[in-house]
Image (spheres, rainbow, N blue to C red):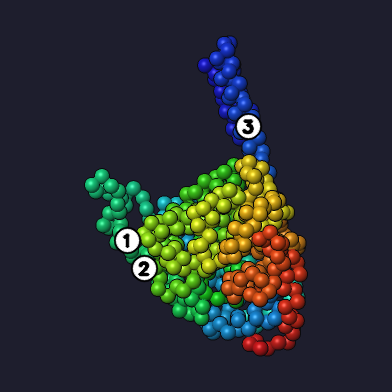
Amino acid sequence: MIHCDALAGFGDLSCRNPAGSAAANAYSRRMTLHRTFRGLCRGAGLLVVLALAACASRERLPPTPNVLRDGSGSRILSSLPAEQRKPEMDILYVTDRSEIGRSERGPEYGYGRATAMAFGTATVSLAPSPSWEELVRLSGQGREHPGFQLDVVRVKEEGEVVLTPESLEVVGGRLRRTAESFRELETEKSKFLALVKSRLEGSAEKDVYLYVHGFNNTFYDAVARAAILWQSIGRQGVFIAYTWPAGYGGPFGYFYDRESGEFTVFHLREMIKVLTELPELKRLHIVAHSRGTDVATTALRELNIAIRAQGKDPHEVLKLETLMLAAPDLDLEVFSQRFWIENLGAVATRTVVYFSSEDDAIGLSNWLFGSKTRIGTLSQIPFSPAQIELIRQMPQIQLVECKVSGFGSSHAYVFGNPAAMSDVVAVLRDRRDVGAAAGRPLESRGNGTWLLTNDYFAKVGEPAEEGMAVGQ
């Protein structure tokens, strides 16, 4: 028998090997496994360090996207209803993070996994605090603005949907919700839909935008990123931050967050189902980043299979206008299987994938999991003629390589660079397709992919004048 004592943290594994070939073989196998495990931990540690570097600073409002330099950003903001003309932004949220306490701003959510989905409103402020007129003006010019810092100042939980063993019963050998639990579910569902409906009624566009964050994000990171996206599209429609139990941190953080992503798929899937039952909702847009792309596409895959099994069209049922995958931490073979073999590519009106060969975090993830490549570094592999032809025949799947600089980190380029964010705005706000004639003058690479560089939309129009009156 081999006696092994695992020391705390990354200490050595102390093993005493008794005599005997069988024991020696067992010892050898265990030591090989231990060395492999430690190697994985070192790799995970590198990935964690990189991701932490990308997320360590608090979110700031990035430079105005180039596409807004024609003044459209200012015009759209100035046309909002009077009650919405304020610098602060109220973002809806849904989370299955566990509550870790209460503070002056409301409930605090950590990285733990909850047996309930909570929903409510999070208010995001800007610092230094601008006037509404100043914010409107800055949203229509290409000059650098003060780089407002975003902070979540209030969190108001409106309800929660609970699923625990106590809410279930066995009937005829099968599990189902108890009658009381079902009534509570319907009550909370109605409250959530009423919250979304009230926001839609105050918006000219009946769109819901759902943001799903990636690895090592906190609740507040997710809400702040959602606020940045909402501000960039002129605060149109309703923006929801779906924030799952990530942000464990430390050398094992990536593995914990990865499994949390698997845990949250059920909740995200059910939330999307409920959301699309709302008659007032005309279009749904899902924006996923990094590890969140696997979470979002897995939930959509399950919905796609279930809806097709009912003989229905998933595109019509889900009302999915846009599926945006930014810096996706998703294996290429898994992506190909889902989007082509299982026909997930037909569920959204358009699926836009942003990738970069300089995305260091995805490169490490490639190494860590032994992938041939991940979608986030798609430019590193050549396409066969058959693959190129397949991509060309499905123009609703748009693969965009971002060769941009000046965005803070190699993994957050989509949301920090004014050229990349211009394409995000053109897709989400204006629902434009690729090609100059369609309003997105991306450069064709000739292999089914498109190129986006720093000068994208740079000449869309002159910056709005300093003294421009609101509404002009």
Residue 212: horizontal and vertical position, in percent? 54, 59
Which is more N-terminal, label 2 or label 1? 1
Q: Is residue 262 left or right of residue 48?
A: left
Q: Could you tell me if residue 45 is visible in this image? A: no
Residue 231: horizontal and vertical position, in percent? 61, 73
Do the CB atoms of the residues marked 2 and 3 lie less than 8 Å apart? no
Tell me the amino acid under the disc marked 2. Answer: Ser
Position of the C terminus, as image quadrant, is bottom right
Which is more N-terminal, label 3 or label 1? 3
Tell me the amino acid under the disc marked 3. Answer: Thr
| Residue in the picture at 27% in, 54% down | 178
Compute the Cα span from label 1 to label 2.
10 Å
Compute the Cα span from label 1 to label 3.
48 Å
Label 3: element kind: helix
Mark in the foreground, 1 or 3: 3
Residue 79: horizontal and vertical position, in percent? 58, 84
Of 291 and 57, the residue lying toward us = 291
| Residue in the picture at 61% in, 73% down | 432
| Residue in the picture at 64% in, 57% down | 388
The disc label shown at residue 36, or none:
3
The disc label shown at residue 184, or none:
1
Residue 351: horizontal and vertical position, in percent? 57, 63
The disc label shown at residue 190, or none:
2
Tell me the amino acid under the disc marked 1. Answer: Glu
